[in-house]
Image (spheres, rainbow, N blue to C red):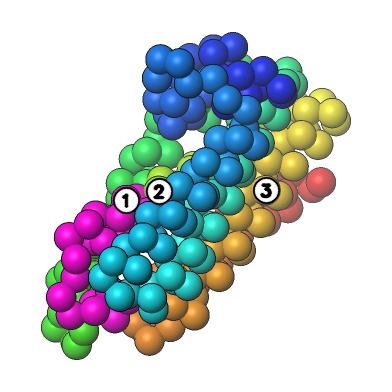
């Protein structure tokens, strides 16, 4: 994956997202951002269609495709932000906090654990689970594996959005970048907000599950409040 047109191998480890480091460390893998995103989408989509055809679970194709679109958009959002950060002279402390702490993974794990708790502790007490409604009462093992993999993919990207939003608040109080850098940083915050809103495309598929739907909407609103608050604090 590229850094303003360069493949991942040119990126400096410690100034990349965790998933960029993993992909960049695979021997022989040297593809552009666009190609990587296309591979991500079509590979997962092919798995979904194959599972639907094999187990007659065609009702899972639409929600599965929506989830893959969100995950792929999250990858695009992270790649774009990473490239922007590496292409401008941002304060060193901000760059280190964004990349080197890997806290986006921590936030992703917390979100993933929260969703799994709702799916397998809360929902079974109130009727069929989301997994059962999408994949049927006898969930194929390979379908469940793909479900959890895509869910983690989304959770990781959501965790990144939260880390960017929290750093936006920190930045509003601690940093005073020049106009050019401030514009680039605001562009990053804007992309985090757009990705958060894009996640609402999943809302129709969880609408009947009140806690999941409330959590999704609440998470998006809270993240937007942080990003707007950071912008209001800077007065720009």
Residue occupying image coordinates x 41% and y 63%: 49
User: How far apart are labels 1 and 3 at the CA level?
Assistant: 24 Å
Q: Nearer the viewer, residue 15 or 230?
A: 15
Which residue has dot 1 on it? 149
Give the extent of the magenta segment. 132-152
Work out whether 50 lies above or below 78. Answer: below
Q: In this view, does 86 lie above or below 77?
A: above
Please say whether residue 151 is one of the residues in the magenta stretch: yes
User: Cβ–Cβ below 8 Å for labels 2 and 1?
Assistant: yes
Q: What element carries label 2?
A: helix
The mark closer to the camera, 3 or 2, is 2
Closer to the camera, 93 or 160? 160
Q: Name the residue under label 3.
A: 191
Which mark identifies residue 84? none
Q: Earlier in the sequence, mark 3 or mark 2?
A: 2
Give the Cα distance between marks 2 and 1.
6 Å
The residue nearer to you, when weighing 176 against 10, is 10
């Amino acid at each position: 994956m590229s850094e303003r047109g360069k493949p991942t191998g040119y990126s400096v480890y410690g100034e990349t997202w965790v998933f960029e480091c993993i992909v960049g460390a695979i021997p022989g893998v040297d593809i552009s951002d666009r190609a990587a995103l296309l591979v991500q989408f079509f590979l997962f989509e092919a798995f979904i269609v194959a599972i639907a055809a094999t187990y007659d679970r065609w009702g899972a194709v639409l929600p599965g495709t929506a989830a893959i679109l969100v995950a792929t958009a999250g990858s695009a959002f992270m790649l774009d932000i990473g490239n922007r950060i590496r292409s401008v002279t941002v304060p060193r402390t901000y760059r280190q906090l964004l990349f080197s702490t890997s806290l986006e993974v921590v936030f992703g794990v917390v979100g993933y654990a929260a969703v799994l708790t709702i799916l397998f502790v809360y929902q079974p007490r109130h009727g069929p689970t989301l997994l059962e409604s999408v994949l049927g009462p006898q969930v194929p093992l390979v379908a469940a594996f793909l479900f959890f993999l895509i869910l983690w993919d989304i959770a990781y990207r959501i965790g990144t959005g939260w880390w960017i939003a929290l750093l936006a608040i920190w930045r509003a109080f601690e940093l005073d970048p020049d106009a050019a850098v401030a514009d680039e940083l605001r562009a990053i915050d804007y992309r985090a907000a757009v990705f958060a809103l894009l996640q609402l495309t999943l809302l129709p598929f969880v609408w009947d599950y009140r806690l999941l739907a409330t959590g999704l909407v609440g998470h998006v609103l809270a993240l937007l409040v942080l990003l707007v608050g950071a912008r209001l604090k800077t007065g720009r």
